[in-house]
Image: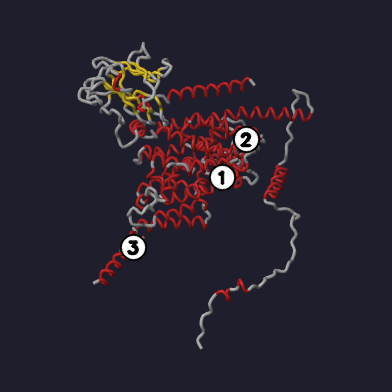
Amino acid sequence: MGDNSFLHFLGGNIMEFLSYTGFANVEIGNLFMILVGFFFMWLAVSKEFEPMLLIPIGFGILLGNIPFKDAGLEIGLYEEGSVLNILYDGVARGWYPPLIFLGIGAMTDFSSIIANPKLMLVGAAAQFGIFAAYAIALGLGFDPNQAASIGIIGGADGPTAILLSSKLAPNLMGAIAISAYSYMALVPVLQPPVMRALTTHQERTIKMKAPRVVSQTEKIIFPIVGVLLTCFIVPTGLPLLGMLFLGNLLKESGVTRRLAETAKGPMIDIVTILLGTMVGASTQAKYFLTGDSLLIFAIGAFSFIIATASGVCFVKIFNLFLKDGNKINPLIGNAGVSAVPHSARISQKLGLEYDPSNYLLMHAMGPNVAGVIGSAVAAGVLLGFLIK
Amino acid sequence: MQNIKKGLLFIIAVFIGVAGYSQRASSLIINEVQTNNVNGLINKNGERVAWFEVYNPTAAPVNISGCYLTNDSLNLKKYRIIKGDHLTKIEPHQRLLFYCNSDTRNGVDYTNFGLVDSTANYLAIVSANGLDIIDEVKVPALGEDISWGCIYDGDKASRATLSHVTPNALNYIGSESSAEQKFKENDQYGIGMALTAMSVVFTALLCLFISFKIIGKIAIRITAARARRAAGVPKGTKVEPVETSGEVYAAIALALSLHEDNDHDYEETVLTMKKVEKRYSPWSSKIYNLRETPKKN
């Protein structure tokens, strides 16, 4: 009798334990997402596509899709008080992206746009992709807040996309972040056909004047004037723009080298690990595997193409008003999307393809960094309009 | 130089204008008014009286104590909101209700004036100096149990008769935020958003462009002046900048890169051959620390 009750107790315990395992709770969606995680990690390791991001995101997908019994164990990402939930706070409340921007600011050299400020306008024009995608998303039945979050994929800026979607459409954030980062990695595939289609051989071989040397004083003034001007116009861009320009001032002031080194080194690395992993973990099958996610991927690709086309076309129109010798090579128009420095490298590569002595990288970095500012301003505008 | 001065003045004017506007925009708003309360809200004395709601549209708490409320445009200091009551602190995006029963003995949220239910009423919030009007409204004559105010909380442009009476609650009740709903109703194709947002993005970067065009010109002049001084050339004489070839830049960049990577032709340390000694000690030998497996005979 006593033995029977003990065996019964033991059997019950084992059965209960088994009911908690991932095997007992697994759904086909979890397995699919785990495969997606493997795919991301394979892309990172074998193809070296954005490994710094795709490894944490891919591994995060595994973490987020390990199934478990919903029994208040405080282990899940969305369970208040769990370790993952505490780490996810930086994504949900949007304080990881500004820290990433601090590091980006400390890494970025704005000399190219200080030397040739008109390239800033190219960075502004490329943001049209965001609003074209916004219109398409509205047409496909998304609400304005969701449409704005999807549209920002066209800004080609992962942290900005995460910040905006965490505020306006948290349920779509996983799909938006993955879409944004995937397309940033796919810039070499998406942009060149658009650039070739919209330019003539003569335009592609335009040689631009070498940029002038920029003084240290100008480099120090830039982040100060930049933050005042942009944030007075769009205060909602303060978290991103404030941190971006602060990071840049740490770099350029010349007296805070240690702080700049930390911002662009260990700090951005730590935040990138946390941000990538938590974004990956947020893509749990039941939230991620929806028709909306597929639409987001489709609109994301479209927004990248429109952003590239807008930048290139704007340069062509701008050239109509510029004197010979001051003309801009339209191949740098694609760099207005702020995938730094990938899109600038595309300009360089295509430029060399058509004229082996035409080095466009330095010129393309102008619209590229202006695109970072432009997309942060665009995100601020969308937040200002919609978050009330 | 004249152009540069004009540009700087323009930027300063824009700054001052924008700063002034932002201060006003962050002030309190009369969000909802009910002048003819017959079957509606009952106050703590069990009375149904006229009331109005003050809304804090900012993201920071606002203390309204010291400010004035009035229903008379000629007497802006009619009712002073006394200090020292916790009620006067309005949390971000929250509201404070004032009952208008001409009896202030009930608390700070009871004004010393009433509102007339049959005619239009003037209402204003006046800053602590008694001069600056923070917000004022002309409320039309309202029927029984009807309220008037901002359809979307804090949006002065949307003031009209409200479909529901919502004291101390959101005026707009819907699944979307009020701003989102506005865009949904008025900008179905996203054209308005695209035009306004692109204008703002262009304005921001255009301002940066103008500023750095001016700063760049100043920097070039300063550099030229320095070059003149260094060359000992009198003022007014143009000094042509020395063109440096791309090869020189490439050589400098290579040298810097080698320096940063600590690569150099002559090593600072000396490489030698040295015999590696491995000193045996039974104290670190596993054989003396583990029991040997018993052997079968």
Residue assigned mark 1: A341
Q: CA distance from mark 3 to mark 2?
A: 62 Å
Q: Residue at x 33, y 26 (%)?
A: B96
Q: Decide which of tag 3 and tag 1 comes sooner along the chain.
A: 3
Residue placed under numbered mark 3 in the picture: A17
Q: Give the residue at the far left of this rendering.
A: B39
Q: Identify the amino acid type marked 2.
A: Lys
Which of the marked residues, 1 or 2, is nearer the chain's N terminus?
Answer: 2
**Res. A330 visible in picture:** no
Residue with the mark numbered 2: A219
Quadrant in the picture for the N terminus of chain B: top right
- Could you tell me if the residues under marks 3 and 2 are in contact, i.e. CB atoms within 8 Å? no
Lower position in the chain sequence, tag 3 or tag 2: 3
Looking at the picture, does residue B223 appear above or below residue A48? Answer: above
Image coordinates of residue B168 in percent, x first then y, are 30, 29
Question: Alpha-carbon distance for marks 3 and 1?
Answer: 50 Å
Three-letter amino acid code at the position of disc 3? Phe
Residue situated furthest right in the rendering? B232
Foreground pick, A97 / A182: A97
Residue with the most extreme bottom position: B297
Q: Nearer the viewer, mark 3 or mark 1?
A: 3
